[in-house]
Amino acid sequence: MSASSAIAVRDPWALVPSLGNLDAYISAVNRLPLLTAEEESSAARSLRDQGDLEAAGRLVLSHLRLVVAISRQYLGYGLPQGDLIQEGNVGLMKAVKRFDPDQGVRLVSYAMHWIKAEIHEYILKNWRMVKVATTKAQRKLFFNLRSMKHQLKAEQADGETHRNTLTEAEVAQVARELNVKREEVLEMETRLSGGDVALEPQTDDEGETFAPIAYLADETQEPTRVIEARSRDELAGNGITRALDVLDPRSRRIVEERWLKVNDDASGGMTLHELAAEYGVSAERIRQIEVAAMKKMKKALTEAA
């Protein structure tokens, strides 16, 4: 039985178990037969010319082992291999859809670019909460710097193997080989060596904790504080004026002299006894008038707010 007939079934994906059992999946795809050049070309033409989805299934199934092999190259980033394989399969299907058998190349060569592109994109989006590579040069550094560092460390003398950072000469070598600036190499090395830090404390302890949120937050721009500041400024200006307007002339003058007046000599307004002498009443009576006036003003300010 030929390879094409071996995987030409109504539901070709039924031959492959779920990625939930990674070992079983890998074992299954490695047992799937490969297509010959003639079978691959015939299936690709059927897909291109007739939209034959069964032919597309044969092309995809016969190259699933390629995705598994490529995914192993990216295990060092700490992401699940099942997720890497799944993203690589998306790239493989994109390659199958765009593959032209008349170009004279095998699908395996054409698909490698699409598989790696999808895996790269997945890693960049999920390796860290904060993106570490956004430009083309940064992507090149991201996927090559780690392996180049390992290669350089392997070439070091035994007494230097403990060193984790690159020397100036090594930075220059990496920049030269990858055709990027040395400053970009240094920046990417710093990004890769740093870890993610939670903005807020990741502990339930009641003791004091110190996290970036404590020094990154600008409390002056926090919405409730902005509203409070505006309300306070309003009350200190127009609000006080409106509150004074509810008082009778004597009460208003007592409040102004006792709380709002500042003389040039910084001595403030008149005392209780000075006001008592002016109005011909006791100092206690002036204090009572002051207390009553403050209550009226407080009520007026509350209603205005």
Image (tube, helix red, strand yellow):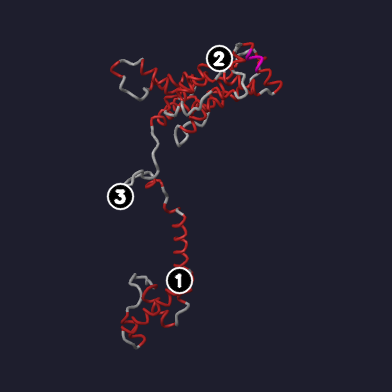
- Which residue is found at the position 44% from the left and 34% from the top? 128
Q: Is mark 1 on a helix, strand or loop?
A: helix
Q: What residue type is labelled 2?
A: Pro
The image shows residue 56 at horizontal and vertical percentages of 63, 22
Vertical arrangement, residue 1 with respect to residue 226, above or below = above
Residue drawn at x 51%, y 32% is: 134
Q: Name the residue under label 3.
A: 206
Decide: few, some or many residues near mark 2? Use Cα within 10 Å; few <14, some 14-19, many ≥20.
Answer: some
The numbered dot on residue 302 is 1
- SS under mark 2: loop
Residue 192 location, quadrant: top left
Disc on res. 33: 2
Quadrant location, the N terminus: top right
Q: Which mark sits nearer the N-terminus, 1 or 3?
A: 3
Q: What x and y, as percent, mark residue 200? A: 38, 45
Measure how far apart labels 1 and 3 are at the Cα level: 37 Å
The part of the chain drawn in magenta is 39-43
Who comes first in sequence, dot 1 or dot 2?
Answer: 2
- Whether pointer 2 and pointer 3 mark residues with C-beta atoms closer than 8 Å, the reply is no
